[in-house]
Image (cartoon, coloured by chain):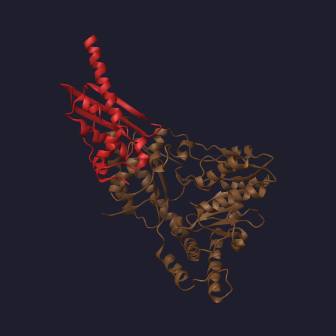
Chain colours: A red, B brown
Amino acid sequence: MYSDKVMDHFTNPRNMGKMENPHGESQVGNPTCGDIMKIAIKVEDNRIKDIKFQTFGCGAAVATSSMITEMVKGKTLDEAMGISNKAVAEALDGLPPVKMHCSNLAAEALHKAIEDYKQRKKGKEEG
Amino acid sequence: MKRIYLDNGATTPTHPEALKAMEPLFTQKYGNPSSIHSFGQEAKVAVDSAREDVQKLINARSPEEIIFTSGGTEANNLAVIGAAMAGKKRGKHIITSKIEHHAVLHPCEYLEKELDFQVTYLPVDEKGRVHIDDFKGAIKEDTILASIMMANNEIGTLQPVKEFTVAARESDVVFHTDAVQVAGTMPLDVQELGVDMLSMSAHKFNGPNGVGALYLRKGVKVHPHMHGGGQENKLRGSTHNTPGIVGLGWVCRYARETMDEKVKHLEELRDMLIEGIEERIPETILNGPRRERLPGNVHFCFPYIEGEAILLNLDLKGIAASSGSACTSGSLAPSHVLLGIGRSHELAHGSLRLTLGIDNTQEDVEYVLQVLPEIVQKLRDMSPLYNK
């Protein structure tokens, strides 16, 4: 059902856990559909210096969360904003069709965390 | 790696002796039982003998009351749609429950949408039981049929079917029960229960896939839904699946001979699993009643985590189980049964069903109890909903 890469990220999730004092964070999904993803980032020199995720969800939800953290660590914010849900699925050698819409939320979670960082930064500069 | 099968509620291994009994029907007694020559007649003898075995397992009055089908789903369709079509001049109201198998719910929805029937879906309590007062209250002047399952396939709840049949009989309502999870696993007596129709399936109790039966009490009218030859009293056209039918007959005989020890064996392992899980894993919710449940059924919700992730981890450890999460149902909604007993979406997604069979051992249970707590904790540590 799942590719080897999905199973690898599912069994050995990268960058999983909570983050102390994140610079930006987000939560997407809801319990009704069965997937919730939380992403927290630290930013330095406009680059993602550290990233952590927590996920409530199926194998695809865990694997996409883990994969995106690996894909964007060290990348600039603009590069990270350019990553799509589809690109995450491709990096995992694909997902079963039924999972494409429900469990493929990692890019959305990442983008929201970056937006949150930008909001906070803006708030600081203005404040 | 050691593999442990704990999904016997989905299907069971075919007993090797059943397979042996089936083999001659493929290679030697391959005649069509409807043919008059000797090849056909020896196949007919085998089918008739299997019919008697099914009759004896459920204590039907005569073998003619047994209609062979392709399985539980077809038996349910024949019962629900067949009795609705045969009774539609008397009325168009049907009673069922919210937690029936889809093989009953979807035929009911079909009758509602396409043929203007009216269906009442009775609620269940927190343990999954339909209450007799609700049942009686739902019976109307034009009620012709009621279908309430004997035991729920997901959470294992046993229904007080006898109470319903008494009420149904008083109001001249035909009563069907889906006994797919019960037949061959628990003692069954259709006369004592007072049901008019009862569905069963061979592969749920160590028979082959693709064969089942509908008990149809003499005098109860149903319309056929498979039109063709005159097989099965003109109720189910189609050349008999002779090997399957013989396999079903064999497991019915076997089930009757081994029933007491099977129930005892399953209940022992079930209670060991339930108690062990509650002891070793914090914050668990047992679904269904503790005792009045299927002897081999264990069903839990584990808050903060999702069912498919549990199944994948168990599978990596060689354990086969199932879940009511949306991810394992092929739709976006979690199990209608868990929602029916009042579980939230979030809890319903985090469910695990372990169903025991005759081949499971105490060591299997011990292995699950060793592996499962670590899996649950690992997933909880990953979950944004878990804050401990």
Front in this rendered view, residue A103 or B296: A103
- Residue B81 at what x, y percent from top left? 69, 57
Q: How many marks?
A: 0
Which residue is outermost to the top? A127
Quadrant for residue B54, please give it. Answer: bottom right
Tell me if I can see residue B42 in this picture: yes
In percent of width and height, residue B275 lies at 43, 51
Q: Which residue is drawn at the image coordinates 55% and 81% (left, top)?
A: B25
* Residue B312, horizontal then vertical, whole percent: 36, 52
Asked whether residue B60 appears in the rendered view, the answer is: no
Which quadrant holds residue B250?
A: bottom right
Depth check: B96 or A72 in front?
A72
Viewer-nearest residue: A126 or A18: A126
Q: Can you say which quadrant of the picture contains the C terminus of chain B?
A: top left
Furthest-bottom residue in view? B38
B326 sits to left or right of B384: right
Q: Is residue B292 above or below residue A55?
A: below
Provide residue B20's location: percent of width, then percent of height: 49, 80
Please report the residue visible at 69 percent of the width from the left and 73 percent of the height from the top.
B231
Relative to B159, residue A73 above or below? above
Residue B217, relative to residue B113: is it above or below? below
Q: Quadrant of the N terminus of chain B?
A: bottom left
